[in-house]
Amino acid sequence: MRQSQMLIPTLKENPADAEIKSHQLLVRAGYIRQIASGIYSFLPIGRRVLSNVENIVREEMEKIGAHEMMMPALEPSELWKETGRWTTFGSELMRINDRHNREFALGATHEEVITSLVRNEVKSYKQLPLTVFQIQNKFRDEARPRFGLLRGREFLMKDAYSFNESYESLDETYDKMFQAYTNIFNRCGLNFRAVIADSGAMGGKDTHEFMVLSEVGEDVIAYSDSSSYAANIEMAPVVATYEKSDEAPKEMEKVSTPNQKTMQEVADFLGHGLEQGLKSIMFQVDEEYVMVVTRGDHEVNDVKLKNLFDAGLVELASEEDTRRLMGTGFGSLGPVDVPEEVKVVADHAVEALVNVSSGANEEGYHYTNVTPGKDFEVSAYADLRFIEEGDPSPDGEGTIQFARGIEVGHVFKLGEFYSERMNATFLNDQGKATTMIMGSYGIGVSRTLAAIVEQYHDDRGITWPANIAPYHVHLLSLNPKKEEQKELADQLYEELKQAGIEVLYDDRKERAGVKFADSDLFGVPVRVTVGKRAGEGVVEVKERATGDQQDLEQHEVVSYVKNWYKL
Ligand code: ATP
Ligand code: MG
C-alpha cells in the first residue's frame, strides 16, 4: 500500500486520556480512534492487525472442529427472560426498543441465542457433540470503560459454544478448547498463563482464564515458582499448616486503647506484631450476620466465605447493623461474647494462636491474652483468607508468587445452566429426552491485540511480533524527489509485492526524520530504506525490535525478507 494514499493519522503527543502504553501507541500510530467512551474505530492498519489476531483464532477453532457462524447482535428480551439474565445481567446489558416497543438486548454474549437455535435444530444424540463459534462485536455498558481496547463498551469477541451428551464428552471438548487457546496465544507471541478461575468447590478445575502477564492487568494471579500451578488469587486455596504456640494461655485482660483505630495502630500501641492480633469483620451472608476472624496480618477472602456458606450474596455488614448487633462500631469488634444471632467463623491460622489481642466490643478497649477455645468458640474453622506470596503452592510444589494479568480468554463448563432453563434436550441412544451439557469459550480479540502491544513496545513505538504485524515490510523512500531513489523504491515495491510480501510503502513527501519516527511508531518488523546509496542499488534493512541493520543490494532484498519471515 502506498502510504500517501492511506488514512494513517499519527500523533506526536499521547492523547490526554490514555494511561497505558497500548492505548497511547495504538492511537498515536494511527491504528484506532475513539468515537465515544469505550467505543473505537479501527483505521486501515488497525483493521489489518485485528484481522491477523482474528485469523489465528479462526484457524485454531476450525482445527478442533468448531465451525464458524454468525448470530445477530440484536437479541430479543424474551430469550434473556427465559434464563433470568434479563434481570441478573444488570446495567451492563445495553437495551433498546423497536418501533413496536419490543425490548431487545445488544449482544453482550450469546448463550441464550445459541441455545434457542440448538434446541430447535438438534434432536438426536447422533448430532452431538457440536461446537460453533463466531467472531463479532459485543456490547457491554461497562461501569468503567478504560485503557483503550482493554475494557471497551463495544469490542470484538470470539465466542464459542459446545453442546455435549455427557459431562465426559464436555471434558473432551473443553480439553481441546484449552489446547486451541494455548496455541492461539502462543501464535500471538504472548507471555501468558492459564489460571484456575472459579469452581464452586475450592481448587476445582471447571473454568480457566487465560491471563497475559502485564503490570497493567486488573487481575492478580497466584502462581507457583516451581510448577505450572496458577490461579486467580480469589480462588487459590491456602494449604499452609500452622504450628500451635506452646505458650501457656494466660488470663484474658481488658485494656484501654484510646483512639487506636486500625489494626496497625492497636498492634503498635500494645507493642506486638500484626500477627499477634485478631482481625474481626462483620459480613452479611444472605440473611445471616457472620463475624469472620483472621490473624491481623491476613486478609479475608469473601469468595471463600461465599463458598463456605454456599451463599448467593456476601457483603460487608453496614456500620449501623453492626452497632445494633454488637453495641459497637467496626474498629472495636472481637469474637469474645458475641450475641447468639451472630455466627463466628475463623480462618485456620487463628486456631493456632495463644495469648493474642482482639477488640473488646467496646469503643476504646481491647482484650489481651485472648486464646481461642478458652475465651471464645467459633462455629467453624475454614480457609477464609487470601493466599499470600511465600505461602506454599496448593499443588504441593514450591511457593506462591504474585503477578498481574490481563484476562484475554475464558473457557467455562456451563453444564446444564442454560439448557435446563431453556429446555434444550435431545433424544439419547435409548430414545430418552436428555438435557444437553454446555460449555462456553470466549476470547477478547480486540483486548488480545492491546495485550500484545503491552508486551511488544519500546519507547519509540510498537514492536509487533511477526504473526500480528500489519505488513511484512515498511519500505521507506527517504527523498522521492531524487529520481534514483524514487525509481529504486518503486521497483522494490513491485518486486516485493510480486513475491507475495505485504508492503507498506512510505512514498510521502515528508522529511526523513518524520518517516523514521512514524516507522518506529507503526512497528512493522522489517524496514527497508532507500536513501543516499540508491544510485549504487544499495538499500538499508533494519529490524524494528532489535535495531540490527545492514546494507543489501537490491536483488538480495526479497530473499532476505522471505527468509526473515520463513515465507
Ligand atoms: P472481565 O472480568 O474482564 O470483565 P468477563 O469475565 O466479563 O471479563 P467474559 O464474559 O468471560 O469476560 O468474556 C470473554 C472475553 O471477552 C474475556 O476473557 C475478555 O478477554 C473479553 N472481554 C470481556 N469484557 C471486555 C471488554 N469490556 N472489553 C474488551 N474485552 C472484553
Ligand atoms: Mg466483565
Image (cartoon, grey):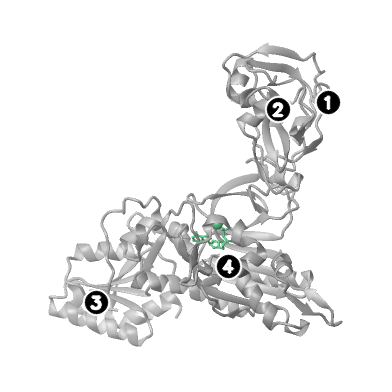
* Residue at numbered disc 2: 325
Q: Quadrant of residue 130?
A: bottom right
* Residue at numbered disc 4: 77
The residue drawn where x is 51% and y is 52% is 217
**Any mark on residue 5, and which?**
3
User: For disc 4, does the CB lie below 8 Å from ligand 1?
Assistant: no
> What is the distance, in whole Å, between disc 4 and disc 3 at their CAs?
45 Å
Between circles 3 and 2, the one closer to the viewer is 2
Q: Secondary structure at mark 3?
A: helix
- Name, please, the residue furthest toward the front: 100
Lower sequence index among marks 2 and 1: 2
In-image side of 356 versus 432 (left or right)? left
Lower sequence index among marks 2 and 4: 4
Between circles 4 and 3, the one closer to the viewer is 4
Lower sequence index among marks 3 and 2: 3
> What is the distance, in whole Å, between disc 2 and disc 4 at their CAs?
43 Å
| Residue 181 shows in the view | no
Q: Position of residue 70 (x, y in %)?
A: 54, 78
Q: Position of residue 299 (x, y in %)?
A: 64, 36
Which quadrant of the figure contains the C terminus?
A: bottom left
Q: Secondary structure at mark 1?
A: loop
